[in-house]
Image: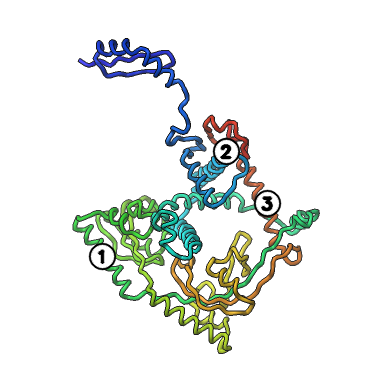
Amino acid sequence: MRNKLILTLAGGLVLALGLKANSAVQHIVQDKSQVKDSLVRAEQPVPEASVVDEVIWVVGDEAILKSDVEVMRLQAEVEGVRFQGNPDCAIPEQIALQKLYLHQAAIDSIEVTESEVNQLVEEQINYWLQMVGGSREKLEEYRKQTINQMRASMHDDFRDRKLVQKMQEKLVEDIKVSPADVRSYFKDVPEDSIPFVPTEVEVQIVTQTPRVEQEEISRVKDVLREYTDRVNRGETTFATLARLYSEDPGSARQGGELDYSGRSMLDPAFANVAFNLTDPKKISKIVETEFGFHIIQLIDKRGDKIKCRHILLKPKVSYEAITKAQLRLDSIANDIRAGKFSFDEAASFISDDKDTRSSKGLMANTSEAGRTSKFRMQDLPTEIARVVDTLKVGQVSDAFQMTNTNTKGKTVCAIIMLKSRVEGHRATITEDFQAMKDVVLRKRREEFLKDWVKEKLKTIYVRVNDRYKDCSFEYEGWIK
């Protein structure tokens, strides 16, 4: 018969040994010195370097892992970001602040759509592509990941960033400043503290969207029909095909699964089909949205929300179609230069860009301050900013290719005209009131958010690993 011998030794170490009683006692007597040595080692703190991962902070019900801090540290090194004070303290505090806003976002039911997340991810990837000259191969080699792996790895981080942004916007939405507030703020400000207004430009644009050939659309639909047949025949599962082939990076790694969503959170065409599904064993007809073509499988319905899987495939634009669009735009640019018609007319009657047609091609810049036609160079899409930098006022560019984030990352071809340029200068109340108002508004909002964090830390549960208790934090409330 096997007995369990439990020995409670000095130092609180409990050893449970599934051994025969006699042999166990004999073994312990013989190796008493080894047991004592083991006790001494057990009482010593485990070296931090030997810990693979651990929870170092808890904010509300949000945990921060040691690995989270290391990931942010590596990102900061790659992007050249510097932290104020000791990075070992500043980095976890930055993550803790994010967790604080995420905790509040959950309480206030703040939501972010997959469309919003995907747009942010695509913008980041497009920025990286521009930095390496547009080469997917160079980007994948540099980052040691495929494009799809990059999308998948960024998804959750960008979702959390958007949630934090929405939460902050909700907190400060009622803060306003008046003209009197602006004048009072800058009344006694030294000249070198008055904001510098960077160079601003107004840009008009004409676009042509290369047409996807019908053969390519038919090919995509045939592939989706094949997926449906394979699932119906029992050869594979919908989730497996989604993981392997779906071009929606946010859901592909989850087997195509989308979390419970209301109609307003989904593309209207997608929602119309998804909400009409009743049998989880059946797959929908092919659905076309602005993202591409989908097939959908129902998982569950709960009230006015639906949970489903989908597979997305995007038809590819051919090189010939892109070349054709650029040649047409070059011809249009030549006609404008020759005076056959104006840029305004071309933008109003020829351009594919529905967002600028009604304004004669004038691009709009939407920010917290409102909507304006003026852009700082860094606020323009990178492809456009590069071309603007080579133009004089009134000059029309040659045709170029760009990625249009307003059309979900689709390739478009464009020509632009530089309508106006105002060189950088110190702001004045008469000429740059909006810029000065933005400074005051931003400061008021920052102060409000700091006060909100201080008050929130008085009521929320926070637990911090002992190794951080000697840190000098921006907010004192972390240490209870």
- As drawn, the label of residue 443 is 3
Instruction: Write the residue at 60% across / 79% down.
Output: 395
| Rendering quarter of residue 408 | bottom left
- As drawn, the label of residue 225 is 1
Q: Amino acid at mark 3?
A: Lys
Q: Is residue 20 visible?
A: yes
Q: Are marks 3 and 1 in contact (CB under 8 Å)?
A: no
Q: Percent from the top left, x then y, of residue 273? A: 34, 62
Query: Separation of disc 3 and disc 1 at Cα?
Result: 55 Å
| Rendering quarter of residue 287 | bottom left
| Mark nearer the N terminus (3 vs 1) | 1
Q: Is residue 180 above or below residue 31?
A: below
Which residue is nearer to you in this view: 404 or 307? 404
Q: Is residue 351 above or below residue 457?
A: below
Instruction: Write the residue at 54% across / 66% down.
Output: 381
* Label 3: few (<14), some (14–19) or many (≥20) C-alpha neighbours in 10 Å: few
| Residue 235 located left or right of residue 307 | left
Q: Quadrant of the C terminus?
A: top right
Which residue is nearer to you in this view: 186 or 172? 186
Q: Percent from the top left, x then y, of residue 345? A: 55, 83
| Residue 270 located left or right of residue 121 | left
SS for callout 1 = helix
